[in-house]
Amino acid sequence: MSFFDLKDTLRPFTALKQFGKKPHTINYPEKTVEASDRYRGLHYNDLDDCIGCGNCSTICQNAAIDMIKIDGIEGKNGDSGLRPRVDNGRCCWCALCVEVCPTGSLSLTKDYNYVTDDADAFLWTPGVDNPDGKDRISFSTADGVSLNDFKRIPMPELEGMERVKSFAEAVIGYNEEQARAEASRCISCALCTEACPDHMHIPEYINAIARGNDADALRIIYDNNPLPEMCGKVCTRRCEDVCAIAVRGEPVAIRWLKRYATETALTSEITREIVNPEIKEPNGKKVGIVGAGPSGLTAAYYLALRGFDVTIYEANAKAGGMTMYGIPKYRLPLESLDKQIEYIEKIGVNIKYNTKVGKDISFEKIYKENDAVFIGVGFPKAWTLGIDGEESKGSMQAVNYLHMINADENVEIGDKVAVIGGGNVAIDAARVSARFGAEVTILYRRRIEDMPADWEEIEGAEDEGINMVPQAIPIKIHSDNKGNVKSIEYLLAEMVPDERGGRPKPVAIEGSNTIMEVTAVMGAIGQQGDYSFLEGEYEEKIKVDRGRFAVNDDQQTSDPKVFAGGDAVNRTADAISAIADGLRACKAIDKMLVGN
Amino acid sequence: MREKATTLYIGPQHPGITGNMMVRLKVEGDTIVKATTEVGYLHRAFEKLQEKRNWLQSFTLMCRFCVPETDPMEESYARAVETIEGREVPERAKYIRVMVLELARLASFMLWYGGQNGSLGLYTIGQWSVGDRNYILDLFEELTGGRVYHMYIWPGGVRRDLPKGFEQRVLKTMDYIEKRLDDYDDIMFNNAIFKKRTQGVGIVDKETAIEYGVVGAVLRGTGIKSDIRIDDPYEVYDKLDFEVPTAEGGDIWARALVRRQEARQSIRIVRQVIADMPEGSVYNRIPNPQKWTLPKGDAYVRTESVRGEIGLYVASDGGLYPRRVHLRGAAYVHGITLLEDVLKGSNVADVSAIMNSLGTCPPEIER
Ligand SMILES: Cc1cc2nc3c(=O)[nH]c(=O)nc-3n(C[C@H](O)[C@H](O)[C@H](O)COP(=O)(O)OP(=O)(O)OC[C@H]3O[C@@H](n4cnc5c(N)ncnc54)[C@H](O)[C@@H]3O)c2cc1C
Ligand code: SF4
């Protein structure tokens, strides 16, 4: 080819034909190009929807997100109070933070990153620095793309009408595969840890289960809960209420996962082998404990591990308190509780059964013989309904009924039972009665959605054919001439909004009297304490305030040597709060007596 | 009389090369007698970082391996993970992946047009092709939210479905680009200067190509027909009708001819996948990334990038992170060993043109 090939020399000049054309890269007057509808630009965060779970910060592989405190946003149950701040010097706009955000509050906008001489502008607090960013949201999870697993692995259960035929455990439990899958939904935000009264290490043990390391999970669980299988079956699980996944999906089944891990240890020996806790040399200090309920057992277990000589005085023939004599066996089988208590005793806790303080032994003796005392006597006495006819035969208190059934005693209830109340005790009494073949109706003053009982318990009761009559206020129990319960009379109520903003109040409708034929009535409207064992100077020294022991943050009563916890102290009245109290008291006693 | 040898340094900053690297040249007159490449300016240790990033986080690092070749990297990683895990990819996602990969080829060819000509002092075409490339980047922005780093092909499929009416906009852009390729021909392939500067320059012969493990247009420019999309097809390439162009001579010119044709083949493929694309979901969702483990195992996947075959090795020890990620890229061989060889005996003025023509890409070499 010659250099002067005419065609190849002239052809490039065809470029000249472009001259008259409209340039495609230059705009006069200059205008900003609108980014596409999916553009990944500066972040926006809906500060109200955000719960500060920090999952964005965890996924960001550039460590571009810090969770920071923001003026005007306070932490609360289910909200850490922190919000993400993005370092735009590190961000690569991958938007993974958006796709793992469980609430959907975080998104990217059409806003371009910009150049400025303000170095601090790199630090961008979405939603704070662009409060109007909502209008320019582009890349979000609104189109349904999300990397959270919102659906729970269903818990296998006996079918409702099958359940009522016996006291067999209704919930069957996850198998290994189900547990791993359920555990894998957790995003380890730890909002649950905050919400748990006992601050259990939830993300840690769930993570162990997800990794297939059940033994580790059990060890982590026993770190601050010596009755975990009980909690795994019946805990009120406030952790699940705040689960970040629950904002748009179903909460991780934290309780069932704990249950799974604890059930992998079939006997108390296996529990001991796996947990293998360090037990300190005896330190020569003695602690006496009144009541072997969850609070007393917890204080005892951890004190024993720390080298204390611990004795529990328990009025009943078995330990466990209300978890033994209150909670029905189809929810918490006897063998399960026995296994856990056996393990606690193996660690060195000494329990004196059938020893009622104030009757079989004086409080004074315990007080004088020990270096510290813990009181965990619970709330054993039921409130009566305070209506006519309550003394009739066949009218009883639900807690007493449950106690007798759990103690294997015979109770005559006939075939038609009315239970008064809307809490867990009411539901338990109703479901137990149904297992004895009775037709059961629950009468509750407010609406079903106002019932304090666990929603799963309410559903369970409905599945088992239990009738619910909401907005019903009992006014009288009628009896026949032999003094046996014949019927219950109640008024219907309407819900009136509370002027002070509280929950609506039931107000009886005059003339709405309804009579229902029944063979037994069970009251379940709450319990109270019984502190008659505190005699003489102790009644004075250990202060009770509105029915509960007055304690400081260390569970210490007005007598520095005496600590108290559980239902006799806190209003939450659940096992996990009692456990938390017991652990707190243990730490305080250790600090007081040994200085640890 | 032999001229005295001197040493010249090209780079690490030099307008003729993408990314930073240096070539140390020993020259006699304007003839190179020895070339030594020096890399190390761009090492970001992505492969190592991935050992401490979970399986999802690692995906976002892939596109950074090589700026003009982001999508083949994402594709390779996704396919490796899917192979180890046995994760299915919905049919629609496979079509979308091929569309993205071919659009990415086109965008990359447009950059090459600019770079190859620019290295010879022919700047007009670069103004055109880089401007035209923006129309493809607009499509990417619309589809993925990003123009260059797409982070779109993820394990299990692609991140989002096509926006409404997207197919039409792609076809329109293809028509436009196809016309523009003719304009490029006029001032490039029918240009005496371009011919003079590229024919017989930077020659790689068949034997050397095979010996060095050369791939892509460099290999095809020696007359050897080889393309992973045909030889070991992935996604839906086996259902598509396209040609693998070759040329004889092994010089810059031959390689340019190959690329020129390949750009047109990409347009042809994009049109086919849009016509054949089935309805359906676009991804099989991975689990919660924080808990996502892959079974123990490994995978080596091959993908045809613009530079040629790339191989990605990914190993899992059953944990939350890759145990090892390793890329066998085209640029490492082409831009170091082969380049040193080809430069020997070449003219100093041709260094940039040869580097470009071999597909030297420092970011990919160093990762
Ligand atoms: C029917 C029912 C169902 C429940 N369901 C649940 C549930 O599903 N989930 C949940 O978390 N919680 C539930 N609870 C509440 C839970 O059982 C209690 O909150 C928890 O047991 C309180 O623990 P505690 O240590 O305070 O006392 P308790 O469990 O009440 O134990 C107190 C112990 O002290 C003993 N004692 C009392 N006085 C003396 C004395 N003078 N001398 C010696 N011993 C004495 C008692 O015999 C008893 O063993 C339920 C309660 C009831 C009644
Ligand atoms: S977009 Fe990606 S890099 Fe940026 S803050 Fe979110 S996760 Fe981090």
Image: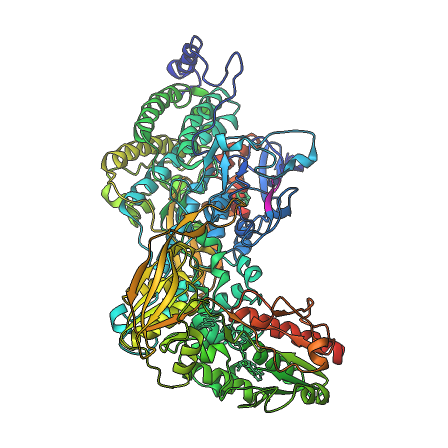
Instruction: Provide the major secondary structure of the magenta segment.
Output: strand
In front of the other: A530 or B270: A530
Q: Is residue A404 magenta?
A: no
In this rendering, is residue B195 above or below B57? above
Residue A275 sits in quarter: bottom right
Q: Quadrant of the N terminus of chain A?
A: top left
Q: Is residue A89 magenta?
A: yes
In the image as oriented, which residue stretches furthest toward the top? A20
Q: Is residue B228 left or right of residue B330?
A: left
Q: Is residue B306 left or right of residue A207?
A: left
Q: Position of residue B191 (x, y in %)?
A: 42, 20
Q: Is residue A265 left or right of residue A374?
A: left
Residue B48 sits in quarter: bottom right
In front of the other: A577 or A208: A577
| Colouring used for the render | rainbow
Residue B8 sits in quarter: top right
Q: Position of residue A455 (x, y in %)?
A: 39, 60
Q: Position of residue B65 (x, y in %)?
A: 50, 45
In front of the other: A427 or B309: A427
Q: Quadrant of the C terminus of chain A?
A: bottom right
In front of the other: A270 or A327: A327
In the image as oriented, which residue stretches furthest toward the front? A481
- Number of disc labels: 0
Residue range corresponding to the magenta coloring: A83-90
In this rendering, is residue A185 above or below B182? below
Residue A554 visible to the viewer: yes
